[in-house]
Amino acid sequence: MTKEKFIEDLSDLLETDVELTLTTNLKEVEEYDSLAIMGLVAYADRNFGKKIPGEKFGEVTDVQSLIDILGAENFE
Amino acid sequence: MKTNCKISGIGVYLPSAVLPNEELESQFPDFKAAKIVKKIGIRQRHIAAPGETALDMGEQAAKNLFSTCPEAEEADFLLFCTQSPDYFLPTGACILQTRLGMSSAMGAFDYNLGCSGFVYGLATAKGLVAGGIASSVLLITAETYSKYLDPGDKGNRSIFGDGAAAVLISSCEEEHFGKFVLGTDGRGCQNLIVRNGGARNRTDGSPDDKLYMNGPEIFNFTIEVVPRLVSQVLADNDMTLDQIDHFVFHQANKYMLSYLGMKIGLPEDKFHIDMEDTGNTVSASIPILLEKLRKKGALHPGDRILMAGFGVGYSYGIGVVTW
């Protein structure tokens, strides 16, 4: 998956008006909440067949850090 | 003695007070009522009154059952499932036997399970009837998680609702209960827990006195376990997915269920999701949904219902029951 595609998907998932980039701090995005994390759990399973431990989502800072948690190997 | 089982009646009780999304929105500025309905599928939840317990609610559910299904009063076994018992001891089921005016010549016990509790109750009732120990079982599931929630915990307050259900399982000539698949994985015990208040840790005023749920981990667990369970229970019952008329899963939240339904490939018209007015009522959620479906006229004699309960423990159970 390209990072651009992921940012597009993430924007849809969060339903946010914030213009997301790799360096956007997700902790400052209001829509990055427990519901968004639930969506990301499903996203990781659906797209990468990957189980992300719940506590990892607490370590997320910017969009790049989320990509790292999802597994950098899954991105071009 | 007849040793086969069927569900003969359902009674439901919901506390009168409700907590609508709008009230949560007024308490929490960042709570968006519309988003909650859309994502988790809940508009309101019923909340037990301060002096009202799961046992009280279970009693009312049983009385509601008795009014439509008088033979339930003659049940010779009572199973009471709750994680909010009135007392450490005595057993709630014993108190219910007397409050409900039932015969003293009955077996009765409590068991502590959450979201898997109803399916475990059906499986246990099947064993009691098949073993000739009981001829009919009154299964009561009642829960008041609201009493364990921190008032500031908007996430869990938006999900959980209180509720109770009473179901009569009767012996009959023809078997209506298929094979059950039960499972347990205590490695997940820390992910949905009230740490304090039992014998290990006394209450100390800390957040550990309240319910803690690691939502993402619970979701991971269901994604891993539920699709496998569905395949297994179908294989064990020599059935295929298209032979099931209704999929009635524990009503955890709409988002999780929708994802599970998509992953397993459940037909939308047969996969019932309805917790808008009740929220996640833990062990009562499956019978509450069954009663909603029955009232709508959606359940017909001979319909095959696949029921699945999964959650706290971790504990999970799944089975196929013919209506």
Image (cartoon, coloured by chain):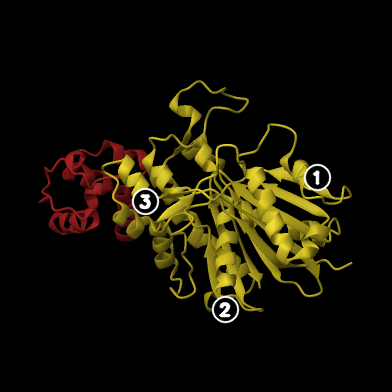
Chain colours: A red, B yellow
When the figure is inspected, residue B6 is found, relative to residue B217, above or below; the finding is below
Kindly identify which residue carries mark 3: B21
Query: Which quadrant of the rendered structure holds the C terminus of chain B?
Result: bottom right
For image coordinates 37% across by 41% down, the residue present is B154
Contact (Cβ within 8 Å) of mark 1 with mark 2: no
Label 3 crowd bin: few (<14), some (14–19), many (20+), radius 10 Å: many
Q: Which sits earlier in the primary sequence, circle 3 or circle 1?
A: 3
> Residue B11, can we see it?
yes
B239 relative to B216, above or below: below
Residue type marked 1: Thr
Amino acid type at circle 3 is Asn
Give the labeled residue for mark 1: B98
Mark 2–mark 3 distance (CA, rounded to whole Å):
38 Å
Q: Earlier in the sequence, mark 2 or mark 3?
A: 3
- Name the residue located 48 percent from the left edge and 62 percent from the top edge: B227
Left-right relation of B3 to B194: right
Q: Which mark is residue B243?
A: 2
SS at mark 2?
helix
Residue B255 position in % (x across, y down): 38, 58
Extreme residue toward the top, this view: B204
Q: CA distance from mark 1 to mark 2?
A: 42 Å
